[in-house]
Amino acid sequence: MPLRPSPRALLDLGRGGRPSRGQLAVTVLWLAGMYTTAAVRTGALEFPGTALTVAVAGAWAPLLLRTWRPVLALLGALVAETLILVFLAVPDSLAATEGMGAYQPVPLATMLAVATLTARVPSRWGWWIGAVAGGYLALVGLSQRSSATSLTDLVLFYVVLTAAAVGVWRSGRRERAQRAAAQRAAETQEAVLDERLRIARELHDVLAHNLTLVNAQAGVAGYLLRTDAAAAERALADITAHTRRAIDDLRATIGLLRTADGTTSDPGADAGAGGPALRPVPGLADLDELVTRFTGAGARVDVARSGAPRPLSPQVDTAAYRIVQESLTNAAKHAPGTTIDLALTWSAGGLLVGVRNPVRADQHPGPGTGHGLIGMRERALSIGGSFRAGPTTDGRFEVLAALPDPLDDGDLT
């Protein structure tokens, strides 16, 4: 059963703080307007009598609360203007000819209170507030005057509803601004999460690749120390090269946080501080060096290229390199000693990357979390491509990534 709001909660509806200078100025000017309309309600300028003067001040006084407690301000204005309609309206003998002037200064206080309240509550509530307040004053006027003033009572309803419309417009504008701000915040949060995932993939690819090679070289060096000291020394030198490469790749990855094109804003900054400048993000131009590092660690990689190689967009180039790197790393870790087949096929629509390696039943696979396959799939999907990985019918494991990068019309001529 839905909970009903308490009377206190209703009174606190739209509650605010102290009025600003502008709001206070409007309230003061509103009092002047109310006295002016009261003075001309019979068609001639006539200063209100004592009773009407006090009544006007009493109807205006609740408006001092409109920014703090707008519900109380509206209730006070309704009560005061009800008394004016009942006791101080233009006599029946003149009301029919004076029209709206017979009720002045009603409903000016209610209009300002309604506009204030409806601007502070959800817009769907504003119409109801205006209809109830305007309908109430119209019914009071209708019950006190003759049927000749029924059109005036209808006008009374519509002018209060018009004030509500002003408040609803302001409320709707505020709600749209809030929704836009919430959407921007959600988009910012999503962009932050995407960036974190992208950096996580980069770090995973860099560390998994280089540490796998270091692990393989360390195993080779440990074996060769007992049989071939010179070869063991070369293996240890390779470990140094791989760790240095890992540090450089990490620097390049961190550099992605600083610029949008994958290069540092100040390529010589690190060099000036005594360290190497950050390298650009690797791409397929570094493929031969990547394969050399794997073969130096004892892996066998056969590379086949078909189609006409061409420059790729930075996103596709980086994705292709990282997918190849991760695939070779997985193959070297889970099926050491086997031959890895790497195939790159260029076409007008993009690049197809295929990596296949035998699955050896006598080899215990290295530890893995599955994050590498997830990262490769995300890289392919993020540029509109497709990705598939799994065993084949001939007992091999295959990674296949289609990376779209169509030629521009200018390139086709």
Image (cartoon, rainbow, N blue to C red):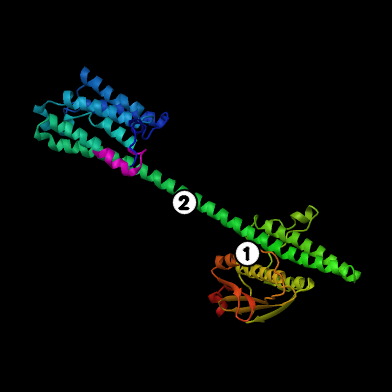
Residue 179 in percent (x, y) is at 43, 48
The disc placed on residue 224 is: none
**Viewer-nearest residue: 163 or 287:** 287
Density class for disc 2 (Cα within 10 Å; few <14, some 14-19, many ≥20) is few
Against 116, residue 64 (above or below) is above
Q: Nearer the viewer, mark 1 or mark 2?
A: 1
Q: Which residue is mark 1?
A: 370
Determine the residue positioned at 24% across, 32% down. 107
Residue 91 in percent (x, y) is at 12, 25
Magenta residues? 118-131
Does residue 28 appear in this view? no
Quadrant placement of the C terminus: bottom right
Quarter of the image holding residue 97?
Answer: top left
Against 382, residue 117 (above or below) is above
Does residue 152 appear to the left or right of 237 in the view shown? left
Q: Is residue 343 magenta?
A: no
Determine the residue positioned at 9% across, 35% down. 147
Q: Which residue is mark 2?
A: 183
Quadrant placement of the N terminus: top left
Which secondary structure is most common in the magenta stretch? helix
As shown in the figure, which amino acid type bears the numbered disc 2? Gln
